[in-house]
Amino acid sequence: MMDAKDELLTEVDEVLAPKKKLDIAYLLYLLIGLTLVLGILFPKVYLTDQIYYNSRKVAKLKSEYDTLKEENKVIKASVEAIKYKNQILDTLF
């Protein structure tokens, strides 16, 4: 009698809460899904990082370019002043 009750309780338990078995197909689907997600997200993250670092380099080069342009203006003014000074000194002697 006790075996019948245990068997009946076991069957009721299986019907109410069936045990999920993780088989090879489930693992394969999981790996394929994970590969697809990484395949889509990795290039986006990589490209975003590359764009960020390249924009930093461009900004640094732009600031250096602007600085060099200003220095060039100062040097040109200095050269003009020296030329003018030499022209004046040449006319005096």
Image (spheres, rainbow, N blue to C red):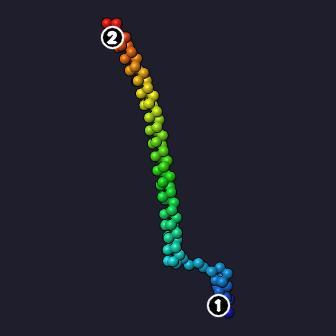
Label 1 and label 2: CA atoms lie apart by 126 Å
Counting residues from the N terminus, which is met first, the one under dot 1 or under dot 2?
Answer: 1
Q: Amino acid at mark 2?
A: Asp
Left or right: 18 in relation to 29: right
Q: Position of residue 77 (x, y in %)?
A: 42, 21
Residue receiving disc 2: 90
Could you classify mark 2 by the number of other residues whose Cα lies within 10 Å: few (under 14), some (14-19), or many (20 or more)? Answer: few
Q: Position of residue 33 (x, y in %)?
A: 52, 69
Instruction: Residue at 63%, 80% (x, y): give it.
Output: 18
Establish if 44 lies above or below 71: below
Q: Is residue 8 above or below residue 80?
A: below
Q: Residue at x 41, y 24 (%)?
A: 76
Q: Residue at x 46, y 37 (%)?
A: 62
Q: Assess disc 1: are there few (<14), some (14-19) or many (≥20) residues with their C-alpha within 10 Å of its C-alpha.
A: few
Of residues 21 and 76, the one nearer the viewer is 76
Instruction: Tell me which amino acid carries mark 1.
Output: Asp
Q: Position of residue 50 (x, y in %)?
A: 46, 50
Q: Nearer the viewer, residue 67 or 77?
A: 77
Residue situated furthest bottom in the rendering? 1
Counting from the top left corner in percent of width and height, residue 30 is at 52, 71
Compare residues 24 and 93 and report the one nearer the observer.
93
Residue occupying the far top of the picture: 93
Residue at mark 1 = 3
- The quarter of the rendered structure image containing the C terminus is top left
Query: Split into 4 quadrants, where in the image is the N terminus?
Result: bottom right
